[in-house]
Image: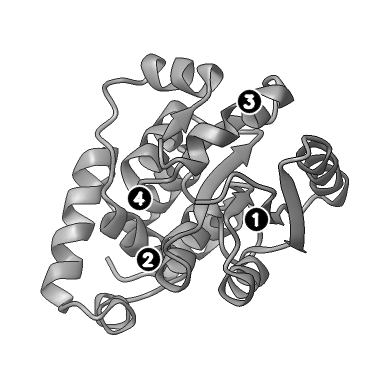
């Protein structure tokens, strides 16, 4: 990986925050922002097109959240370093991001310079979690993190997918989907699909707009 300037894509549905992130990164002299996106699907398209060195993703975005963007975009751009930079998040969500393999997790409420200072380590392949994000994780250290595949299944369920539909979309069997659903319900202490989706929203793993659709999913 070159020493910079590194090419970056920024995805955040708040224009002011996206511009602030752009100014911060470009002001460091180490980053050239080559594209921005205001929602998750646009972020995936931009990352697929640009193959950036680094992608800065908000966790809560319309159409696809930061975890969904990470899981999908890395298929098209595996060399990109993925960083989630978020405002409202729980320790469970941080743990899930770390488990999924994102390269960095930072809080918008933290010191903006923390991300800039961590850039060389992130670009060298290290996983960097900010002090604030670590503190959240430690408060909820009993949370059993979902795997990356379980996160994909959870997100598909939240969109109203039946076991058969989720299986077709992910290229796995309906029985495997059912096993993942069962594991997720155990980990989240949920007893129905609606409770499972609400738990995902509460933990910051799903966009709140997913909650009303919970009743449409197969139980």
Q: Residue at x 75, y 62 (%)?
A: 34
Q: Is residue 38 left or right of residue 117?
A: right
Mark carried by residue 117: 3
- Mark found first going from the N terminus, 3 or 4: 3
Give yes or no for contact between labels 4 and 2 (Cβ–Cβ under 8 Å): yes
Q: Secondary structure at mark 2?
A: helix
- Residue matched to label 4: 196
Q: Is residue 114 above or below residue 48?
A: above
- Compute the Cα span from label 1 to label 3: 26 Å
The residue closer to the viewer here, 101 or 147, is: 101
The reply to whether residue 37 is visible in this rendering is: no
* 170 lies left or right of 215: left
Query: Around disc 2, counting alpha carbons within 10 Å, would you say few (fewer than 14), some (14 to 19), or many (20 or more)?
Result: many
In this view, the mark in front (2 or 3): 3
* Element at label 1: loop
Closer to the N terminus: mark 1 or mark 3? 1
Q: CA distance from mark 4 to mark 2?
A: 9 Å
- Mark closest to the chain's N terminus, 1 or 4: 1
Q: Which mark is residue 61?
A: 1
Q: Residue at x 61, y 71 (%)?
A: 41
At label 4, counting other C-alpha atoms closer than 10 Å, the crowd grade (few under 14, some 14-19, many 20 or more) is many
Numbered circle sitting on residue 157? 2
């Amino acid at each position: 990986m070159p020493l910079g300037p590194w090419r970056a894509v920024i995805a955040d549905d708040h224009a002011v925050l996206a511009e602030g992130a752009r100014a911060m990164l470009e002001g460091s002299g180490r980053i050239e922002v080559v594209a921005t996106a205001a929602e998750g699907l646009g972020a995936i398209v931009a990352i697929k097109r640009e193959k950036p060195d680094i992608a800065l993703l908000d966790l809560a975005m319309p159409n696809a959240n930061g975890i969904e963007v990470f899981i999908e975009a890395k298929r098209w751009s595996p060399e990109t370093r993925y960083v989630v930079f978020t405002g409202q998040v729980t320790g469970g969500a941080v743990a899930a991001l770390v488990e999924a393999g994102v390269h960095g997790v930072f809080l918008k409420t933290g010191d903006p310079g923390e991300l800039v200072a961590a850039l060389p380590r992130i670009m060298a392949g290290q996983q960097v979690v900010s002090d604030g994000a670590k503190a959240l994780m430690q408060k909820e250290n009993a949370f059993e993190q979902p795997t990356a595949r379980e996160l994909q299944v959870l997100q598909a369920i939240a969109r109203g997918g039946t076991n058969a539909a989720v299986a077709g979309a992910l290229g796995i069997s309906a029985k495997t989907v059912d096993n993942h659903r069962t594991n997720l319900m155990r980990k989240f202490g949920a007893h129905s699909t609606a409770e499972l989706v609400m738990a995902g929203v509460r933990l910051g793993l799903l966009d709140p707009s997913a909650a009303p659709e919970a009743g449409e999913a197969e139980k």
